[in-house]
Image (tube, rainbow, N blue to C red):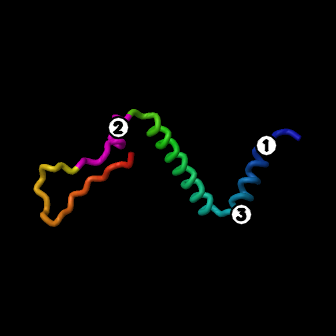
């Protein structure tokens, strides 16, 4: 039993298209492509240094601004 010829692969492809339909295969392909892209972006983000713009924390609120008198200022502290 040797390797499959091109005719065998064409018949398999035809059967798969008949079973699933082209719309489901298109959705499956785009979902798979999105997953691969997300994985690559995640791997790239894991290997980058902290100097990237995505890793910059949000700006802190400064105490020098004039606040609304109804605002309560609270400072969160961690338990030691």
Which residue lies under the disc numbered 1?
5
Is disc 2 in contact with disc 1, using a CB cutoff of under 8 Å? no
Mark 1 neighbour class, 10 Å CA radius: few under 14, some 14 to 19, many 20 or more: few
| Residue 52 to residue 73: above or below | above
Mark 2 neighbour class, 10 Å CA radius: few under 14, some 14 to 19, many 20 or more: few
User: As rendered, which of 12 and 63 lies closer to the eye?
Assistant: 63
The numbered dot on residue 59 is none
Which residue lies under the disc numbered 3?
19
In the picture provided, is 2 more to the left or to the right than 19?
A: right
- Read off the magenta span: 50-60
- First-in-chain label (2 vs 3): 3
Q: Residue at x 62, y 58 (%)?
A: 25
- First-in-chain label (2 vs 1): 1
Of helix, strand and loop, which mostly describes the magenta segment?
loop
Mark 2 → mark 3, Cα distance in angstroms: 46 Å
For marks 3 and 1, give the one nearer the viewer: 3
- Under tag 2, what secondary structure? loop
- Under tag 3, what secondary structure? helix
Q: Quadrant of residue 30?
A: bottom right
User: As rendered, which of 62 and 20 lies closer to the eye?
Assistant: 62
- First-in-chain label (3 vs 1): 1
Residue 37 on image: x %, y %: 50, 46
Residue 18 on image: x %, y %: 71, 63
- Under tag 1, what secondary structure? loop
The numbered dot on residue 52 is 2
In the picture provided, is 2 more to the left or to the right than 78?
A: right
For marks 2 and 1, give the one nearer the viewer: 2
Residue 4 on image: x %, y %: 80, 43
For marks 2 and 3, give the one nearer the viewer: 2
């Amino acid at each position: 039993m040797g390797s499959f010829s091109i005719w065998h692969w064409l018949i398999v492809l035809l059967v798969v298209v008949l079973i699933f339909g082209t719309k489901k295969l298109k959705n499956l392909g785009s979902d798979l492509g999105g997953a691969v892209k997300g994985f690559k972006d995640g791997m790239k983000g894991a290997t980058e240094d902290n100097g990237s713009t995505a890793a910059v924390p949000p700006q802190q609120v400064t105490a020098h601004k004039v606040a609304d008198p109804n605002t309560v200022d609270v400072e969160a502290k961690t338990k030691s």
